[in-house]
Amino acid sequence: MALRMDNVGIVVADLDAAIEFFVELGLELEGRAMIEGAWSGRVTGVTDQRVEIAMLRTPDGHGRLELSRFLAPEVVADHRTAPVNALGYLRVMFNVDDLDDTLARLRERGATLVEGGEVVQYEDTYRLCYVRGPEGILVGLAQSLTAG
């Protein structure tokens, strides 16, 4: 059996700001589309939905991120500022070549280290941190310290 992840989805209020943030991180915008109609409600269980989406991919082509902005129905819950020990989806983690440069660029887009968090080194393997991006989206960043 072949299994491969297609994408991770994040619901946002400001689609343009989220796209800009993830493009600055290094993802590439594949395209934007409006998703609506009876078929889409049958997939998600949310009838009469109108959702604007943007699909982004990692430069290596192995990962994709789907950003969604619900136009209808109204958003019913907000988990963006949940602490890192909350149940449910936690974060998306990206491996970057230069953590310091990436942080500097993302800070220009409003990213901040999580409250009480810092950049740490795990053994001789990784430098890691968690940042809050647009709307409080939690993103992990890791820089490999090993060759290859």
Image (cartoon, grey):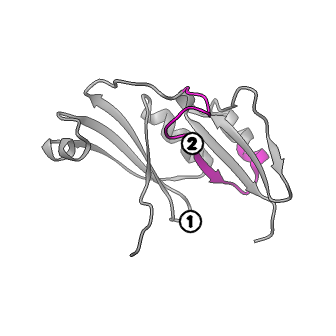
Q: Nearer the viewer, residue 68 or 127?
A: 127
Kindly report which numbered mark, 1 or 2, lies closer to the viewer in this rendering: 2
Specify the quadrant of the image occupied by residue 109.
Answer: top right
- Whether 12 is drawn above or below 120: the answer is above
Task: Name the quarter where the N terminus is drawn.
Answer: bottom left
The disc placed on residue 91 is 2
Magenta-drawn stretch contains 134: no
| Residue closer to the observer: 66 or 83 | 83
Q: Magenta residues: mostly which secondary structure?
A: loop
| Region in magenta | 81-102
Total tally of numbered discs in the picture: 2
Q: Is residue 146 left or right of residue 74?
A: right
Residue 25: x and y, percent? 61, 47
Question: In which quarter of the view is residue 83 placed?
Answer: top right
Q: Position of residue 117 (x, y in %)?
A: 75, 32
Image quarter where the C terminus lies is bottom right
- Distance between the alpha carbons at the discs numbered 1 and 2: 20 Å
First in sequence: mark 1 vs mark 2? 1
Question: On the rendered structure, is 84 left or right of 104?
Answer: left
Asked if residue 100 is among those painted magenta in the image, a careful observer would answer: yes
